[in-house]
Image (cartoon, rainbow, N blue to C red):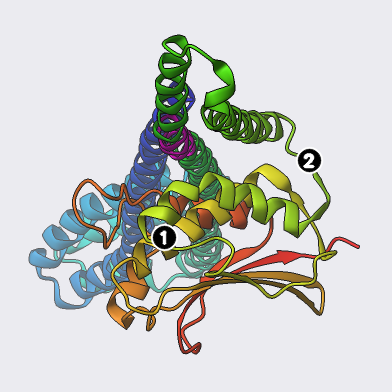
Amino acid sequence: MRNRSQFLFFLLFTSTFVFCLIIFFGSRRALIESVENTKKITQLQEAKSNIVYYDEVLTMSARMAAYTGSRKWIERYYLVVEKLDKAIDVAKKLAPSSISYKGAEVTEIANQELIKLEELSFNLVKENQQLKAQGVLLSSEYDRQKEIYSQGMKELDVELEKEIFKLQQTADYNINLTSSLFLILILILILIWWFVVKKLVILQRTLSLQKEREFEQATEMALLGEIAAGIGHDIRSPIAVIVANLNILKNAEKQERHSKSIESIENSLKTMNSMIGNLLSLARNGEEDKVRLEFLEKIVQEALSFSAKRLRLATLDIEKDIVKKYPEDFQIICPKAKLTQVLINLIQNAADAVSDLEEKWIEIDGFIEGNFYFVSVTDSGNGISEDVAEKIFRPQYTTKEEGKGTGLGLSLSYKMVQRLGGELFLDKNYGHTRFVIKLPNHH
């Protein structure tokens, strides 16, 4: 049992550790991919904007150079060309498919033609021929090539936008997939925890029940030992009587004169035989203690016989001070040995409770109410205080003086009746001290 418990703890720990690692690396991967995709999208959007912007700046720089004749615009033109090339390289690296769109080749040819025309214009500016430079940039050929190039750049812009949209979709898909896996892993982890905890609870209950049974068996043996010890003490008295009377007979000249000694020996032997018979009966019933229909009178008589010494010590007379209120033919469905043990405990407790009282009596009753049998043991005591009543069925709790009680009797009796599907309780509303056994009527 302990090995299974240790294995379940190991399984719980290992599964938790493994799933935590999976969740950690899954989350880490999702975070890295999300950052990378966001970075790509940002860079691609920046490159797309720069391509459009730098293209417009190139056209403007070429025209300003032609109209003003300033070489600064030519220098600016070539600086922007470098920046435009870098922006296109970034786009090629991040979205290589977008650069090879349908009109990319035609656009590149138009771009080369525009560069030639703009460089021709720059050379004319350098030769101080501004009007010719302007004429080049205002020519129909320049406009035609510019139109082709502008249309191609629009297509490039659309392709780059598509690529950005794909990247965004991929990023969203990865995040959604990772989130779903994360939730699934958490659910699996919860299920594993639930399964293992459930098994641990079952194991704990099994161990608890096993310990409880072992404790009950030990306490049952302790109670039987106490009963046996009492019987042992009781047997000593008739043995002493027998030995004494045998010595008298041994020394007697005529046995006729000692008929009283013979009668005393006979009575003592009968008492011993009855005690041993009761003990054997209880032992046999304990071994084969089946639930069957029993006469309550027979069970009570056995319990009183076992408790005879305790009753004598309390100066209670079985014939006068023990009141039986149930009908003589009253029957009850129960395991005889267990009910006998419970009644022995209740009767002996009652005897101890009233031993110092002036008014001493014990009342035993049995009746049926609804689907239950009730057997009660009442003594002449004035009841039990609320504080003691709350603890009285706890193991090892006793109100008796040290050495007079183990505190096992009532707790064991309580468990015995509980295992039979019944209940043992203190009737707090009754005027005297009254314990009630409630058992189900199986008819």
Would residue 230 be counted in the magenta stretch? yes
Q: Which residue is mark 2?
A: 290
Amino acid, disc 1: Asn
Residue at screen point 80% across, 66% down: 328
- Callout 2: few (<14), some (14-19), or many (20+) C-alpha neighbours within 10 Å? some
192 left or right of 122 in image: right
Residue 22 x, y percent position in the rendering: 42, 37
Q: What label does residue 349 carry, if any?
A: 1
Residue 253 x, y percent position in the rendering: 48, 11
141 left or right of 403 in image: right
Q: Bounds of the magenta span?
A: 219-232
Q: Secondary structure at mark 1?
A: helix
Residue at screen point 70% across, 35% down: 285
Residue at screen point 36% across, 34% down: 17
Q: How far apart are labels 1 and 2 at the CA level?
A: 26 Å
Closer to us: 412 or 65 = 412
Does the rendering let one see residue 187?
Answer: no
